[in-house]
Image (spheres, coloured by chain):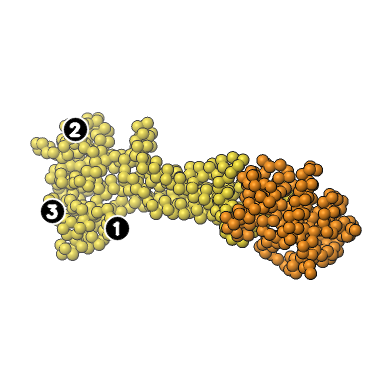
Chain colours: A yellow, B orange
Amino acid sequence: MTMRFSMWLSGRLLVPKGESKYARLRLVRSAALIAIVMIPLVLALIFMDGMMNGITDKYILLQDGHIQLHVEDPLFDSQYDVSAIDPRLESADYVVSGYGIVYSRDTTAEVRIKGVDISYFNENRMTQLEFTGEPLKKEGSLAAVMLSTTIAQKLGVEVGQRVAFMVVPDSSSSVVRPVLANVTALYDSGYHELDSSLLFMNRDDAMRYFPKDRNAYTELLVSRDHVDDLGAIVATLESAMDKNFPYATWDEFNGTVYQNFITSRQVILLVFMMILLVAGVYVSSIAQEMIQDSMQSIALFKTLGATNSNLSWAYFCSVMVVTSIGLVAGVSLGLLIGSQIGVLLHWLGNSGLAGLQYYLLDFRIVISWRDILAISFSMLVISSVTVRLSLGRIRRISPLEMLQQD
Amino acid sequence: MTKELLRFHTVTKTFVSGQSQLVILEDLDFVLYSGTSVAITGKSGSGKSTLLNIAGGLDKPSAGSVSFLGRELGALNDKDLSAFRNRHIGFVFQSHILLDDFTALENVCVPALIRGARQADAVKRAKELLDRVGLSDRLQHRPQKLSGGERQRVAICRALVNAPDLIIADEPTGSLDEESSSGIETLLTDIVREEGKTLLMVTHDTQLASRCSTVYLLHNRTLQEME
């Protein structure tokens, strides 16, 4: 007995001929249902990874940088090419930061004030922002601020108008007084949560308004491929400049956000596995249905000399081919729809879905091939186990059952 | 000298249903020699089909033993028993029992493919046999498109495709009209003789039984040779 018969029978089961219209429909339906399970899994994976990376990028590029070197004075002037020290470094910006309250005629907003030089908005950061007006352009003696469109809407102000702000001192001995500022530009990072609390101010003004309690540091960005080398990059800097720097990395000051992402991802992958288990049970039901419909044929094959192993292989291969077709179709369609997820989110956003304000509507598509392969492989493994269990039915079919129709 | 092909040694077969026990065959001794044709007749329910099932390795005796070419069938595991049926036995049943979704040609090819023959070789042999029984123009027809006589001819070809030692036929003309029966009787006995095979057949048809070299009557759970 060889595998030749199993392969031949498997082919016949996969391409049923003659009157087997129902058998053909069942195969198509089964593959379609597997695809329908896989599409949302792949879509959810793309959405989750793209969203997490997008939000992380916003926090890193606009709020905290990859590395903060906590040194009071500027380490480099704004034109200095920091990649000359370490090619993994993309930029270094001296930043002054603090907290404050912004007032308009009608309302107030609590904000984090970030004092930066205009060179802070380099090519890398500009990919995350859309501007209206001229960022931080100084006119007269008033401070120049750039609000997010979210804060501006809350305060009811526009470019060219004035707001009052008051810094919140760390020390109770400081004298607090409100000052006026020009709104020279509005920005929109696309992420409501970040925009609702971040205000950019001309750095020289920020240094003036946070004279004693200012939190000043050098914010470093590194290239995307080296985000896991932050410690080594600082070591290179220290070595090159012959100094030791107190520093913090982005995942430390966004520890909660970072940990939430990791936990969410793990939970979602666990949910995926549960869905795959259910899908595996469905795949085993395809095998059961095929066997149930061919009991007499199986009994006849056994009478003619087919072994349990021959028949099990034939049915196993057929079901797994159907599963694989559904899997490939589902993953392909998931990728196709996933590549257009931005369009989908914008459409949902425009339709007034309130919950979307907490998500990015525009982010770089990230396809985690490793996870997609892991999900596909898990689907095949789970299906192969459940199908093998179902195929035990073949063993229990006696050749004599065939004679019952005689 | 004719070779001993099949031997039943004090074979008993009982069926248990709840508390009751029904003895179908009892201490039955029977030898079938190679190249002979044997018909078994008897009343309905006398155990003829059970005897054939045991001879073909489809069922096992409750007591006693069955040997084929000196090899005890009771000692074979499922896999070896499957191989035994595939290589040594050709089955022809009363209502042909063909695979409805397969063509006549594919139905005949199945035992050869199970044996491990290349598809081209199986098709060649199946075509030869179907041509020999006058069905060369029905190769791609499915069973439901064939008449009862044609289906039984396909079943005979399927039984012969692996050139088995023994053809087991259970009422091969039982479901056919008189004209078709006559054709199948001639075909079955002639083709088995021409191929040099051994035939073990159960039939109620006295005309068909008379074509065989030996006729047995299964009566009171044992076989009696008829003159």
Q: Which mark is residue A383?
A: none
Chain where mark 1 sits: A
- Residue A197 rendering spot, x and y as whole percentages: 27, 41
Q: Which mark is residue A80?
A: 3
Q: Which residue is mark 1?
A: A228
Instruction: Please report the residue visible at 19 percent of the width from the left and 62 percent of the height from the top.
Output: A238
Label 2: how many Cα within 10 Å (few below 14, some 14–19, many 20+): some
**Left or right: B100, with A243 as reference point:** right
Q: Which circle, 3 or 2, is nearer the viewer?
A: 3
**Left or right: B180, with A60 as reference point:** right
Per the model, the C-alpha gap separating discs 3 and 2 is 31 Å
- Is residue A343 or residue A59 the one in the foreground? A343
Instruction: Please report the residue visible at 16 percent of the width from the left and 58 percent of the height from the top.
Output: A84
Look at the picture and state if A33 lies above or below A312: above
Instruction: Indicate which disc, 3 or 2, sits on the residue closer to the N terminus.
Output: 3
Q: Inspect this view and state whether residue A110 appears.
A: no
Chain where mark 3 sits: A
Secondary element at image label 3:
loop
Looking at the rendered structure, whether the residues under marks 3 and 2 are on a common chain is answered as: yes
Instruction: Please report the residue visible at 56 percent of the width from the left and 40 percent of the height from the top.
Output: A25
Label 1: how many Cα within 10 Å (few below 14, some 14–19, many 20+): few
Secondary element at image label 1:
loop
Q: Which circle, 1 or 2, is nearer the viewer?
A: 1
**Left or right: A27, with A257 as reference point:** right
- Is residue A92 or residue B87 the one in the foreground? B87
> Which quadrant holds the N terminus of chain B?
bottom right
Q: Which mark is residue A159?
A: 2
